[in-house]
Amino acid sequence: MRRLTSVHISNPEIFKNQLLLWSQKFEEIVWLDSNHYKHSYANYDAVLAVEAFTSIQTDYHDAFEQLKTYQTSTKDWLFGYLSYDLKNDVEALTSKNFDGLQFPELCFFQPKKLFLLKGNTLEMQYLNFVADEVEDDLQTITSAVSSSTTEKSSEDHTIKIKLRIHKDEYFQKVNTMLNHIHRGDIYEANFCQEFYAEQTSIHPFEIYNKLNKISKPPFATFIRLYDKYLLSASPERYIKKEGNKIISQPIKGTAKRSLHKDEDFQLKKGLSEDSKERSENVMIVDLVRNDLSKTATKGSVKVEELCEVYSFKQVHQMISTVTSEIDDTMHPVDVIKTTFPMGSMTGAPKISAMRIIEELEETKRGLYSGAVGYFTPESDFDFNVVIRSILYNASEQYVSYSVGGAITAKSDPLKEYEECLLKAKAMREVLEN
């Protein structure tokens, strides 16, 4: 049983910084921050889970079945991630590309300590608590502000970022994908490329804070699982369960922002009216509708929003919202398994797109274009899409970030390449400065 304590927080923004700073002493950390973004279906302003009581870590073999057993037996809060390569558990697919990060393909833990912040109310849930532990932790957390000024700065060296796929090769690969589209093998595929640095040490806490500050996304994430780190500025929800309702919010369509109000408005308007971007989005909405229908009650799949444009600090994004209803007998992990990987990071038809992606990409995606999130004791869940993210293996001193875009029949390889650079801008900035 968990001990629940509710506390009034006078300044939530300062407290969030203190809480994340305090968490750095733990080896198992999942931090989720909405940055007060007013998006649909939000639950909490910020969530912190630390210190594993139990955990599961596995490769793709029977991964979803193992997760199902783990979630059923604990019936508690579980936090962790699903890597893209769990596709190999769902379909007869493989992942043979280079993997410099070497993250486990699935990892979840049941936290001893959980913090749920909404408005001025902090709920603390502790497993196996001892007397005065909650009060002692609160006192330590709220005094952490003084130590934030002594935070270490980045190593005094230049991070040399390399491209796994160079520009001319990128054009060749996109043209090969376009040939597949023109032959009718696929309608659309998300093609990604990796940027990386070897023999490089970074301070993940500092890099995350920089990335979050310039992006302020609704699904920001800091993960530490021993020597593996994820620093994410994701704007995208993959899938959420609220009771019997399932919500998926795929993103397809990106435009840059401008500091000039009139120009920024025109960029946003241009994105909303762009036939190529809208067709990309609609194709993925159809795919998501099909995925949700596998577990939905008859006639319950609905498109609540189609091609709505939302503005973030770095970019405008085109987002759709697709929902469904499930019956009480449906296991939450089965809902995830039948929709994984998310359509926005694969393509249509899904299996053909994933096969072609594997042939043309040079890097195993791993956690990139996977998902991070949690299960509740009531078997609800909420997961983001791991994009706009920096991944770091501290033992291997390997830093990586990947970006991608949807290739359709209307794609111009140069414009696709420029869109990738736009998406990569924030990650490159925080690593190089």
Image: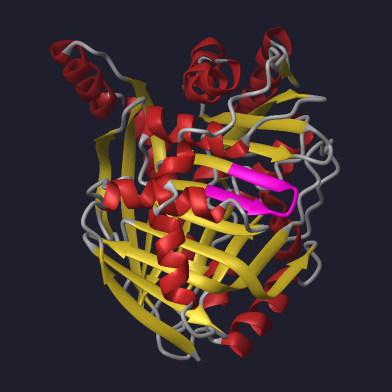
Q: Residue at x 82, y 41 (%)?
A: 395
Q: Residue furthest left?
A: 262
Q: Nearer the viewer, residue 176 or 105?
A: 105
What secondary structure do most residues of the magenta stretch adopt?
A: strand
At 69% from the left edge and 63% from the top edge, which residue is drawn? 107
Look at the picture and state if 46 lies above or below 125: above
Q: Residue at x 39, y 40 (%)?
A: 281
Residue 5 in percent (x, y) is at: 35, 79
**Residue 381 visible in the picture:** no
**For this rendering, which residue is in front, 229 or 359?**
229
Image height check: is 160 above or below 382? above
Q: Nearer the viewer, residue 355 or 361?
A: 361
Q: Where does residue 104 sit, x and y in percent of width and height? A: 77, 56
Instruction: Answer with the quarter of the image where residue 109 lies.
Output: bottom right
Residue 290 in the image, given as x and y percentages of width and height: 46, 61
Q: Residue 166 location, x and y as percent? A: 72, 12
Above-or-below relation of 223 to 297: above
Q: Is residue 223 magenta?
A: yes
Q: Is residue 267 magenta?
A: no
Which portion, as a residue range, is magenta? 222-230
Would you say residue 121 is visible in this rendering? yes
Q: Is residue 374 above or below residue 156?
A: below
Residue pictured at 75% horizontal, 21% vertical: 164
In the picture, measured across the screen, residue 337 lies left or right of residue 294, that is right
> Between residues 350 and 4, which one lies in front from this camera angle?
4
